[in-house]
Image (cartoon, helix red, strand yellow):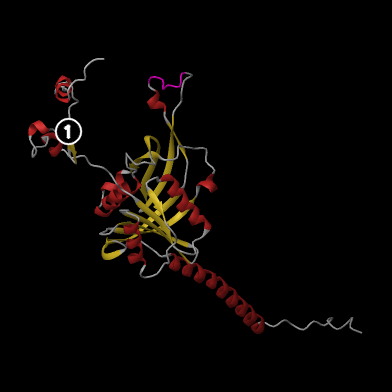
């Protein structure tokens, strides 16, 4: 049998690992990039410091008031399906303190914007569009509402895909239109790296101004494919737009400096409330009835002033 080696001899014969064979240590990661130890502990790459990465973390809270009609609720659900970066919440009571309640909800949901659909008298729909918690906020009257279920259009695009936003040239005329354009751009633009968003564009949101109203349309970008499922040369010019829906019209009422309130930055001088429109229609109908009553009284006065002569043969056949 061989002799046992001593412990000291065995430890000397064990090959110690070389420094070159060991894996290099991974540099520490910082908020502005990877940190190289060779540059020193306090030095960071200047290229990362000069150009920090901007990440769009926009989130929109979409909710409505109680006693909303089914058509307006369907419009809200259509917008929720078009905006993957939105969060839907329960209905909120439409009171004077709704601003504080909505600001608290936006903070609890970690959102930065809010779309609040307020229905009054189950006839009139108002849309509050606000940047929380510091503002500004806009109040719109929504009209000409057509949901996707009503229109039944042939357009169809992938759910969650990012839209292209187009604005008419009228948005550059006045200061309040520029502000509205920026708010629409921030709320309806889907962040690039959002987890629910698809990384390509296949539809367009169109915002156009006509008669001091903002008209919204949603179109699918349709292209003609070959058998190889590739675009032909020059196929980008042959793209067509197919409407998907929904449709609605926004009439701006007031722009406030804060969130759901604050100083008034702009007030629409041409705005007429729906209550005044209905009152005028009632007056017109009441005017028709008054004309009928006046015509009746005039007929009676004419008959009294011009009585008929007695007929000689009126009582001939009574016997």
**Residue picked out by circle 1:** 27
* Residue 181 pos. (x, y %): 30, 49
In the rendered image, the residue lying farthest to the top is 1
Q: Residue at x 43, y 39 (%)?
A: 219
| Frontmost residue, 95 versus 289 | 95
Q: Is 266 on the left or on the right of 8, as rendered?
A: right
| Frontmost residue, 126 versus 52 | 52
Question: Can you tell which quarter of the image residue 3 is in?
Answer: top left
| Frontmost residue, 258 versus 239 | 258
| Frontmost residue, 213 versus 293 | 213
Q: Quadrant of the N terminus?
A: top left
Q: Residue at x 27, y 52 (%)?
A: 179
* Residue 54 pos. (x, y %): 23, 41
**Dominant SS type (magenta):** loop
Question: Can you tell which quarter of the image residue 30 is in?
Answer: top left
Secondary structure at badge 1 equals: loop
Q: Is residue 312 located in the magenta-colored stretch of the structure? A: no
Question: Can you tell which quarter of the image residue 218 is in?
Answer: top left
Q: Is residue 68 above or below residue 80?
A: below
10 Å crowding of disc 1: few (<14), some (14-19), many (20+): few
Q: Is 123 on the left or on the right of 22, as rendered?
A: right
Q: Is 237 on the left or on the right of 309, as rendered?
A: left
In the rendered image, the residue lying farthest to the front is 1
Q: Quadrant of the C terminus?
A: bottom right
In the rendered image, the residue lying farthest to the right is 319
Q: Residue at x 17, y 39 (%)?
A: 32
Q: Is residue 218 above or below residue 265?
A: above
* Residue 221 pos. (x, y %): 42, 34
Q: Is 257 on the left or on the right of 161, as rendered?
A: left
Magenta region = 228-233
């Amino acid at each position: 049998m061989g002799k046992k080696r001593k412990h000291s001899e065995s430890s000397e014969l064990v090959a110690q690992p070389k420094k070159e064979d060991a894996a290099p240590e991974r540099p520490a990661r910082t908020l502005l990039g990877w940190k190289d130890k060779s540059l020193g502990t306090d030095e960071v790459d200047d290229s990362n410091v000069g150009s920090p990465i901007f990440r769009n973390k926009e989130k929109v809270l979409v909710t409505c008031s109680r006693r909303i009609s089914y058509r307006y609720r369907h419009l809200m659900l259509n917008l929720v399906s078009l905006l993957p970066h939105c969060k839907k919440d329960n209905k909120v009571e439409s009171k004077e303190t709704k601003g504080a309640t909505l600001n608290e909800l936006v903070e609890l949901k970690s959102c930065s914007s809010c779309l609040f659909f307020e229905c009054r008298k189950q006839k009139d729909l108002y849309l509050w569009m606000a940047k929380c918690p510091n503002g500004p906020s806009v109040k719109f009257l929504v009209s000409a509402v057509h949901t996707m279920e009503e229109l039944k259009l042939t357009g169809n695009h992938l759910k969650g895909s990012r839209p292209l936003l187009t604005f008419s040239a009228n948005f550059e005329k006045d200061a309040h239109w520029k502000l509205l354009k920026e708010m629409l751009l921030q709320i309806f633009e889907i962040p690039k790296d959002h987890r629910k968003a698809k990384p390509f564009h296949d539809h367009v949101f169109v915002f156009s101004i006509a008669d001091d109203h903002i008209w919204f349309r949603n179109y699918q970008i349709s292209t003609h494919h070959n058998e190889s499922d590739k675009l032909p040369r020059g196929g980008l010019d042959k793209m067509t737009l197919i409407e998907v829906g929904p449709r609605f019209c926004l009439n701006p009422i007031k722009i406030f400096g804060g969130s759901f309130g604050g100083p008034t930055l702009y007030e629409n001088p041409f705005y007429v409330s729906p209550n005044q429109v209905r009152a005028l229609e009632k007056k017109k109908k009441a005017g028709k009835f008054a004309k009928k009553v006046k015509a009746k009284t005039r007929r009676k006065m004419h008959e009294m002033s011009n009585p008929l002569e007695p007929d000689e043969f009126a009582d001939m056949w009574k016997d």
